Image (cartoon, rainbow, N blue to C red):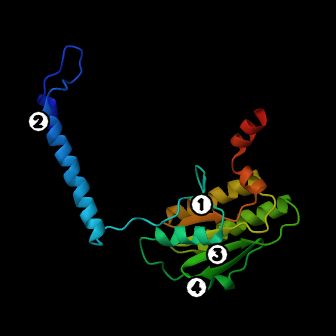
């Protein structure tokens, strides 16, 4: 088809003439055949429509969902390989985190942080690094923000470090249950723009 397009004459203004009905029919027929093949594969069960929920809140780095079920479903729907065994997450010890297993997903929750002190941020960064080291390749991790009221720049930097380490292992991280104030801290430019208007 590329040769047909390249060999077609152009008008003096650089536009292609509309009068070539045979060429238009050829393109239409090719598009119809491709569409028909896709439909027939779908109806025969060879091709399925993806039921993976889109991230509710678009972020350049993180996939954010309103609810735990949505985040878990997103992880499960895009898992390409069987998740390797990682041991018992309930036995892992952290300063600021709890870990457990929900099916094939590693569920990570925060302990109550009394104040965003330097010590707490240092412990959180240490916990994220320890978590990344504890997980095997192709892990599915859901970070649950239930009960978290404040999540500052230092904590987001530590979380980005965790996300980078997980991605290097072929693992995936989703975030869920973010309070509006916590969610806003992930979008500082949006907050500034809203304040200006």
Tell me the element at label 1.
helix
Tell me the element at label 2.
helix
Q: Is residue 143 left or right of residue 11?
A: right
Q: Earlier in the sequence, mark 3 or mark 2?
A: 2
Residue 44 screen position, x and y as percent: 26, 71
The quadrant in which residue 117 appears is: bottom right
Q: Is residue 183 left or right of residue 53?
A: right
Q: Are marks 2 and 4 in contact (CB under 8 Å)?
A: no
Q: Which residue is mark 4?
A: 87
Q: CA distance from mark 3 to mark 1?
A: 15 Å
Q: Which residue is mark 3?
A: 107
Q: Tell me the quarter of the image containing the C terminus.
A: top right
Q: Is residue 145 left or right of residue 37?
A: right
Q: Which residue is mark 1?
A: 163
- 144, above or below 84, in the image: above
Q: Earlier in the sequence, mark 2 or mark 4?
A: 2
> Looking at the rendered structure, which numbered label has been put on residue 22?
2
The one nearer the camera, 82 or 6, is 6
Q: Earlier in the sequence, mark 1 or mark 2?
A: 2
- 151, above or below 8, in the image: below
């Amino acid at each position: 088809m590329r040769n047909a397009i390249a060999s077609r004459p152009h008008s003096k203004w650089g536009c292609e003439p509309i009068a070539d009905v045979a060429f238009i029919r050829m393109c239409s027929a090719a598009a119809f055949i491709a569409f028909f093949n896709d439909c027939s594969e779908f109806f025969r069960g060879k091709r399925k429509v993806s039921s993976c929920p889109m991230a509710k809140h678009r972020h350049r780095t993180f996939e954010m969902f309103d609810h735990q079920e949505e985040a878990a479903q997103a992880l499960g729907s895009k898992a390409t390989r069987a998740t390797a065994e990682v041991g018992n997450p309930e036995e892992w010890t952290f300063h600021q985190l709890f870990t457990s297993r929900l099916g094939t997903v590693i569920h990570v929750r925060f302990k109550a942080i009394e104040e965003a002190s330097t010590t707490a941020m240092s412990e959180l960064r240490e916990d994220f690094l320890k978590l990344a080291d504890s997980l095997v390749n192709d892990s599915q991790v859901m970070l649950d923000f239930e009960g978290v009221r404040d999540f500052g720049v230092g904590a987001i930097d530590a979380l980005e470090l965790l996300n980078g380490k997980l991605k290097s292992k072929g693992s995936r991280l989703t975030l869920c249950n973010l309070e509006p104030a916590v969610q806003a801290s992930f979008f500082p430019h949006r907050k500034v723009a809203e304040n200006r208007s």
